Image (cartoon, rainbow, N blue to C red):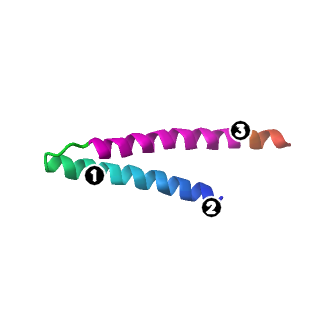
């Protein structure tokens, strides 16, 4: 259970850092490529994590 919490904290942290990086670099007229990569990675991790949670929760009902 703790691993799932750490996973979601990492995903949210990566997303927030990516957004902040994009805002800061855009305000300085620098390329925002690194921030964009972080946001894309966090979205991919979110989709994978949500799918894994849905799969595990759907299997819980079949254990009766």
Q: Quadrant of residue 56?
A: top right
Q: Which mark is residue 64?
A: none
| Residue 21: image tag | 1
- Mark 2, secondary structure of its residue: helix
How many numbered discs sit on the rendered protein? 3
Cα distance in 3D space between marks 2 and 3: 20 Å
Q: Would you identify the image quadrant in which residue 50 lies?
A: top right
**First to last magenta residue range:** 33-58
Q: Residue 6 location, x and y as percent? A: 55, 59
Q: Residue at x 39, y 49 (%)?
A: 15
Q: Residues within 10 Å of mark 3 (few under 14, many from 20)?
A: few
Q: At 47% across and 51% down in the image, what residue appears?
A: 11
Q: Tell whether label 1 touches label 2 (CB within 8 Å).
A: no
Q: Main secondary structure of the magenta part?
A: helix
Q: Position of residue 25 (x, y in %)?
A: 20, 49
Separation (CA) of disc 2 from disc 1: 28 Å
Quadrant of the rendering where the N terminus is positioned: bottom right
Residue under pointer 2: 2
Where is residue 47 drawn, in percent x and y? Answer: 52, 38
Label 2 vs 3, first from the N-terminus: 2
Residue drawn at x 14%, y 50% is 28
Q: Residues within 10 Å of mark 2 (few under 14, many from 20)?
A: few
Sequence order check, earlier mark of 2 and 1: 2
Q: Is residue 2 above or below residue 19?
A: below
Q: Looking at this view, is 11 or 31 the one in front?
A: 31
Circle number at residue 58? 3
Q: Earlier in the sequence, mark 1 or mark 3?
A: 1
């Amino acid at each position: 259970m703790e691993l799932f919490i750490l996973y979601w904290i990492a995903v949210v942290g990566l997303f927030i850092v990516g957004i902040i990086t994009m805002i800061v670099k855009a305000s300085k007229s620098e390329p925002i490529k690194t921030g964009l990569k972080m946001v894309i990675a966090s979205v991919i991790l979110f989709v994978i994590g949500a799918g894994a949670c849905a799969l595990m929760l759907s299997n819980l009902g079949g254990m009766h």
